[in-house]
Image: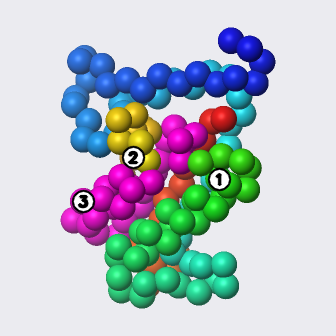
Amino acid sequence: MPEGSVSRRYLSPDTMPSPYGYSQVVEARGGRTVFLAGQVPFNANDELVGPGDFPAQVRQAFENVKAGLAAVDMTFANVVKMQFFVTDIANLAKVRDIRDEFIDTTQPPASTSVQVVALFRPDVLFEMDVIAVG
């Protein structure tokens, strides 16, 4: 593999439980690794987007991740791991619907979803972080 190039393998081995919309294993070799801090539904003016509107909050967090990736010349195609924090796991299908607008669903990143009692403010319903390789 030439210096600076990246190879990725997205796997869901038969020896593991069948995933729903994510890969069980993502192997990335080469390139650089970028860790994005947890992104919440605030815009560039530090205003909460979508008070009480879960899908609007999810979309804003994804847009923030998109902006963070762009700052290091990457896109969602570079994301190998996503982690979601939700205050109500019943909203997970809404997260997946919005996520699928941003990722390649034929090679989805590894993913973890966690229900939490609360995030850093009571009006924040969603947070996500990602790891990208490029």
- Secondary structure beneath label 1: helix
Pointer 3 residue: 93
Residue 125 in the image: above or below residue 90 = below
Q: CA distance from mark 1 to mark 3?
A: 24 Å
Query: Is residue 89 in sight in this rendering?
Result: no
Of residues 48 and 105, the one nearer the viewer is 105
Pointer 1 residue: 69
Query: Is residue 127 in sight in this rendering?
Result: yes
Give the amino acid type for the residue marked by disc 3 in the picture: Ala
Q: How many marks?
A: 3
- Secondary structure beneath label 3: helix
Q: CA distance from mark 2 to mark 3?
A: 14 Å
Magenta span dominant secondary structure: helix
Magenta segment: 76-102
- Secondary structure beneath label 2: strand
Residue 85's disc is none
- x and y, in percent, of residue 88 in the image: 28, 69
- x and y, in percent, of residue 32 in the image: 72, 33
Pointer 2 residue: 112
Left or right of 41 on screen, residue 89:
left
Q: CA distance from mark 1 to mark 2?
A: 19 Å
Q: Earlier in the sequence, mark 2 or mark 3?
A: 3
Q: Earlier in the sequence, mark 1 or mark 3?
A: 1
Are circles 1 and 3 on residues that touch, CB within 8 Å?
no
- x and y, in percent, of residue 120 in the image: 52, 75
